[in-house]
Amino acid sequence: MQRLVSLVAVLGALSVISACGGGSAGGGDGGDLLQQVKDAGVLRVSTDPAYPPQSFQTESGEFKGFDIDVAEEVAKRMGVEVEWQTPSWDVITAGNWNGRWDLSVGSMTPTPDRRKVLHFSPAYYYVPAAAAVHETNTNITDPETDLDGKMIGVCAACTYEAYLEGSLNIPGEYEYVVDDPQVKTYDTDSSAIQDLALGDGARLDAVMSSLYTLKEAQKAGTPIKVVGDPLFYEPLAAAIDKEAPADPQPLVDEVSKTIREMHEDGTLTKLSQKWYGIDLTERQGA
Amino acid sequence: MNIRDRLEARSAHYSFRAKLAVVWILIFVALAVLFAAFRFDTAFMLQWLPFILAGVPLTILISIMGILLAVPLALLGALGRLSRNPVFNGISGFYVSFIRGTPLIVQIFFIYLGLPQLAQYAPGPLQGLFILGTITSGVLALGINYGAYMAEIFRAGIQSVGHGQVEAAQALGMTRTQTMRRIVLPQAIRVSIPPTGNEFIAMIKDSSLVGIVGTQELFFRASKIGRQYFQNLETLVIAALIYWLLTSIFSYFQGRLERRLARGYVREGGGPHGH
């Protein structure tokens, strides 16, 4: 009897918990992923809101930035609302989202490894990847020669890590110019930048990231400076889980079609001008 | 006479409490001076305070749900550890030992990231049970983790009830279950409530680990804003102060609850002959 009472209490607590958490996981209630999104009227999009000007949160908790505007425009054209999810970057790029969210509009480069687990839309913009050093540094001026053997910070599971390891495999022309770097990985770019800011060689000699992430940090007063020309240009695209519980292909097609339309009608150019001050929607040199 | 003795003699007519207050005030003045010296960006802190504060309800919700799950688990665990049934005892022993022997962050990741891999082996309608949201995963991990620690608290509570009482109950013809329910548990629960309050306060702090999987609670908000603007010190100080305030408030109520529950056991009028 005593045990029965406790058991009932446990089951009660469990049901309370599952009631509050349930419903978010997309069940297999028929239809493909696109149909499910339209039925729910909600497109669940993952973003990492620590990357101004791509994605960040305002004081009132609102999500803002280039990625955010792109995702909201895509949702608007599908006739649904966006719901934001904030898992960590390596969880997003690993695929197998288990239906926890539908789409990533997170400035992701379609690398071969990621293509194994994710479907990609056409690129919605292209950003240069660059290196930065502490502002007091004087011996690293040309990343093509001066970064060899240096301690370089990058975000884990990022294209910059793959570049330094020589395993980056994306369209476009680029060379692996950094020989034998010591790569130190971080949960997110800004943690690496923070470590670089501690002093020249204190924890890091350099950081590799998107040119605009580095510039944004510089603008915020972080004592770092970008050196040399960009090392490569990465195409950035929206991604959808290949292993989604419901067939993802119609949603991939719909998002791809919408992004192509947004290229054509100048929406992406306008948004790029708004957030970056220049048009990044065309592939650049290098 | 050394300096310490002289200071003690000089200040003998001030009460201990007054001296304590002076020490605390000095600590705060020293901290304020430090803040000023390091040019703490107070405008930035004020600007982002509401955003970080908005994570407090979720922090408290996660903690309350966690403790609600932990209590029945702890009770089951404690009864199991005291049970003569080898299956029940063995399962509880494993639960308490395994959960106490593994880090909470591993348990959170296990439920949030590990469990979904098993979903494919489950029958269709049950698959949702393996794929849990961040909040649900966090609450489950906290509840299961604290349940194991609190099982030991409850076990101590049950064992604190004098054996004579159990014998008396049995002499009156009560069964083991009746004895447990009518005699032992009511007294054990009284003893166990104050430490349960302590566990709840500890859980408020550990709920910050749930932020790592992407729940927009207090710590997640503080660390994201800190990184975004490269002002981690400021946002972490805000988070620390809020956690401290929360735990202080709950400690105060916990202290009152403890005194209230002890009322029947403290002799009126005090005096030298308490027990």
Image (tube, coloured by chain):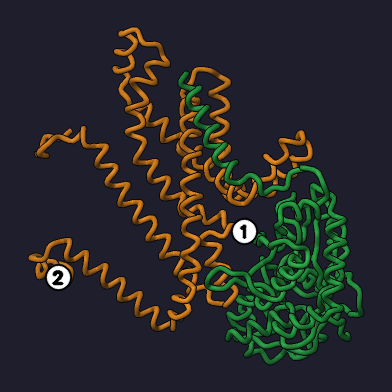
Chain colours: A green, B orange
SS class, disc 1: loop
Residue A46's x, y, as percent?
70, 62
Quadrant of the rendered image containing residue A237: bottom right
Left or right side of A237 for B72 = left
- Asked where in the image residue A130 lies, by quadrant, the reply is bottom right
Residue A262 x %, y %? 82, 75
Crowdedness near tag 2: few (<14), some (14–19) or many (≥20) residues, C-alpha within 10 Å: few
The residue that appears at 74% across and 82% down in the rendered structure is A211
Mark carried by residue B7: 2
Q: Determine which residue is flagged by label 1.
A: B214
Mark 2 falls on what kind of element? helix
Residue drawn where x is 64% and y is 73% of the image: A64
Rendered-image quadrant of the C terminus of chain B? top left
Q: CA distance from mark 1 to mark 2?
A: 53 Å
Confirm whether residue B229 shows in the render. yes
Q: Nearer the viewer, mark 1 or mark 2?
A: 1
A250 versus A56 height, above or below = above
Residue at (81, 77) in percent of width and height:
A125
**Nearer-N-terminus badge (1/2):** 2
Q: Residue at horizontal 48%, vertical 27%? A: A6
Q: Quadrant of residue A173?
A: bottom right
Front one among B168 and A40: A40
Q: Could you tell me which chain the residue with mark 2 belongs to?
A: B
